Image: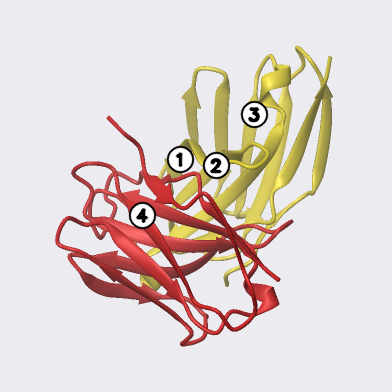
Amino acid sequence: DAGVTQSPTHLIKTRGQQVTLRCSPISGHKSVSWYQQVLGQGPQFIFQYYEKEERGRGNFPDRFSARQFPNYSSELNVNALLLGDSALYLCASSLDLMGNTGELFFGEGSRLTVL
Amino acid sequence: GEDVEQSLFLSVREGDSSVINCTYTDSSSTYLYWYKQEPGAGLQLLTYIFSNMDMKQDQRLTVLLNKKDKHLSLRIADTQTGDSAIYFCAERYLRTGANNLFFGTGTRLTVIP
C-alpha cells in the first residue's frame, strides 16, 4: 500500500504569491493533519481535518487555509507568502479523529522556498 | 504546557547503544512518540507508547517512560551507521485535539564507524 503522498516535492515562490500543496492520505485513513517544519526546528501543527471538517487549528495566521475532499485528500493554501513561510510542509494521516491506535504517519513533505 | 525538550546532539560508536532523552511538560499526555528524520526526508514513525505504559520494546528499540518525572527515552541497541539521523520526541494530549502533536527540536544522532 502507498504511504502518505505529497505534491509537489519542491517549489520556489516569490513574496506575495500564493501556493497550494496537496496530500493524499494512506488508503482507509480519514484524518489529515498539516505541519510546518522550519529548518532546524521540530514540526509545528497547522491544521487537522476529518470528514471534510476542520477539527483543529494551530497558531498560524489566516493566510493559511486548508480543505479536505470527499476522497479524504487535502490541500493546504498559503496566501501572500512571506520569506518566513519557507519551510518543509508535512502532511500526516491517521485512521480516525481520535487516533485510537496512536499511529500517525507522515509524508515526505513539500519543501517551499520563498524568495 | 507544550514544551518538549531534547538535547541537540549525540555521538556514539557503531555497535554501542544510543540513548536519546526527552522531557515533556503536560501530565495529561496520552501518547508519546519517537520519529526519525533523515536529511531531506519526512518523518518516519519509529515507535510510540501509551501513557499508562512504562516500557515498550520493539526489536532494537526500547522506550522508557517515567511519568512522575515526565521523562521519555529511546534506547537503540547495536547502533548502526544507518541510524544516523535526527530523532524527534513528540507528545499528544486530548485537550488540544486528537492528532495535534507537540514536537521537540530533535536530537541529531551521529554514528561513528
Asked if the residues shown at circle 2 and circle 1 are in contact, with their CB atoms under 8 angstroms apart, the answer is yes
Give the residue pinned by disc 2.
B34
The residue furthest bottom is A62
Q: Is residue B46 left or right of residue A32?
A: right
Name the amino acid, label 3: Arg
Q: Are marks 1 and 3 on the same chain?
A: yes
Question: Mark 3 or mark 2: which comes first in sequence?
Answer: 2
Q: Please report, as a chain letter, where disc 4 is located.
A: A
Give the residue pinned by disc 3.
B75
Q: Is residue B65 left or right of residue A83?
A: left
Q: Colour of chain A?
A: red
Residue A5, percent across and down?
Answer: 38, 45
Q: Colour of chain B?
A: yellow
Q: Are marks 3 and 2 on the same chain?
A: yes
Look at the numbered disc 3 and give the secondary structure of its residue: strand
Residue A51 lies in quadrant:
bottom left
Q: CA distance from mark 1 to mark 3?
A: 13 Å
Q: CA distance from mark 2 to mark 4?
A: 23 Å
Quick one: A18 or B93, which is closer to the camera? A18
Give the residue pinned by disc 4.
A23
Q: Please report, as a chain letter, where disc 1 is located.
A: B
Q: Residues within 10 Å of mark 4 (few under 14, many from 20)?
A: many
Give the residue pinned by disc 1.
B48
Q: Is residue A55 left or right of residue B88?
A: left
Residue plotted at (47% across, 53% down): A8
Q: Residues within 10 Å of mark 2 (few under 14, many from 20)?
A: many
